[in-house]
Image: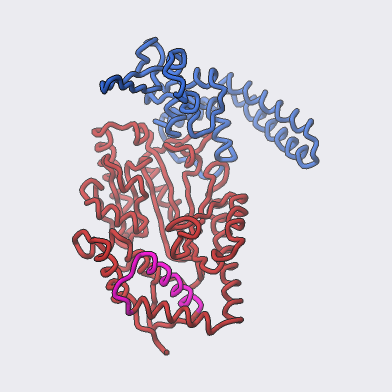
Chain colours: A red, B blue
Amino acid sequence: MLKWFEETDRESPNIIYSRIRLVRNWTEYPFSGKLTEGQAREMVSRLEKGMRDFCLEEGRDYDFTMLEELSDLERRALRERRILNGTLASKKDPVGLILSRDERVSLVLNGDDHIRMQFIAPGMKLKELWKEADRADDFINGIFPYAYDRKYGFLTAYPTNVGTGLRASAVVHLPALSSGKKFSSLLGEMSRFGASVRGLYGEGNENYGSLYVVSNQKTLGVTEEEIAGLVEKVARQLAEQEQQVRDMALSSDRLGQEDEAYKSYGVLKYARRLTWKDAMIFLSRMMTGVSDGILKFDGPCPVFSIMLGIQKANLQRISQRPLSRAELDVARAGYIRAELPELSGI
Amino acid sequence: MLCEKCRVREATIQYTEVVNGVRTEHNFCAQCASEMDLGQDFPLGRLLSGLLGLGTESPREEKYSQVVCPTCGTSYGDFVKNSRFGCPDCYEVFDLLISDKIKQLQGSDSHKGKTAKNQTEKTERQEERAEAPSDGKDGLEEQIARLYACQQAAVRREDYEEAARCRDEIRKLRTGSETDA
């Protein structure tokens, strides 16, 4: 079965994927930080039993794992694939994970909050994802009563999630826009609308790959539809502006753009050693070339899937042993060579 | 844990003393700690001010930092330190203290959007409680909304005196209703 990141979405260029995250707490227990180990185990097992119906109802194939049964490497690989966040990947308490085979849907039990639902899809699918999350949420709420207050809405361990408990985000690829001088002030503008924009793999000039995450800052006092709508609007706006800058570059210097795309493909296809930074820079340029129709393949070319694949934990997982820095660079180049499809129609 | 000096208030400060390589740990409440001389370099006030930007109006805040949620034992001081609640009841216990801060953080202090579809005792109890004084309450919310709109309009036309008057009115209504509850 294809994972969500192995699919490509041609409808919304420069928007790589979108994600809905919803956190909820069960009225029967205090928040996760206050649970004893025994309580936490009991709660996770009760939640997991209840969720089996949800999985059946959904008709997707799900796997249940306790995070403590996973190796550190596997947890880090899950983090690289956006299933876990940093705190969850290193959390020592009993944490349950229900993950659909395509990794689009994941439920974390006893993370920062009792239930954390995540729905991911390639391209801009926030409206659809919210509908899906809303349905799942209603179903689960039918089994487990939620901590809810008339004034504050859904109650969460952190006040930054209270209200809707909803974080909507979209990852956009902005190589041209982010190299402009006014980019940082543009991002500042976005925060005035209540959207935050930050680098997916680092801040400022260090964000190799030029991928940016747009997400909502506020979770209280705005409806779920408003939140999803705001993030979609900002992400689309950025993606469109990016396209305008690139179209200008294409019409003024097409040869230069083509040269950059083909050179990047060449390096990635034939290099024997690639550092993470170089690989991300060339993959980003290739992504631009694919999106602008310069590089053509017979089938789809999921560049973002390769970006996920060349992260450290995943490469080590494939090699099934810890790798030194030099070995990692060799493994990375090998991975890319194997994954990159052949160009067509040159 | 109780403060080891006064044995009355919740201990919110852990003080580690190392004398000639011997390490001893003490747990004090903020009030006792500030009364003791723990060395002038100890930035007590700043430690407490935590993430939510409590100013140095410390006597008041320190008094509040010992308010403890009876359900889970989280004190207001813990909340300030970790910006994290211990259980759903914390929201109710600390409501008066956190309302403004949540508003600062979220730009709002009242939920819009989806509601829980629980059929449990707890929400029924909560709803009863919310509905009981509703004669005045709904009217109050409306009044506040009206005043808020008035305040916004005043700000737009730069009539700050009027805006301040509205703000004070809102505050009066809010505190009135909250102490009643």
Image position, residue A285 (x, y; %): 46, 73
- Quick check: is A249 in the magenta stretch? no
- Quick check: is A278 in the magenta stretch? yes
| Magenta residues (range) | A270-292
Magenta segment's dominant SS is helix
Occupied quadrant, residue B112: top right
Image position, residue A62 (x, y; %): 28, 56
Residue at 37 percent across and 66 percent down: it is A307
Image position, residue B154 (x, y; %): 78, 37
Residue at 37 percent across and 77 percent down: it is A267
Residue at 61 percent across and 56 percent down: it is A185
Q: Name the foreground residue: A79 vs A107.
A: A79
Task: Answer above or below: position of B159 versus A99.
Answer: above
Residue A117 appears left or right of A240: left
Image position, residue A78 (x, y; %): 31, 55
The reply to whether residue A218 is visible in this rendering is yes
In the picture as drawn, the residue positioned furthest to the bottom comes out as A346
Residue at 52 percent across and 22 percent down: it is B61
Q: Name the foreground residue: B94 vs A137.
A: B94
Residue A7 appears left or right of B151: left
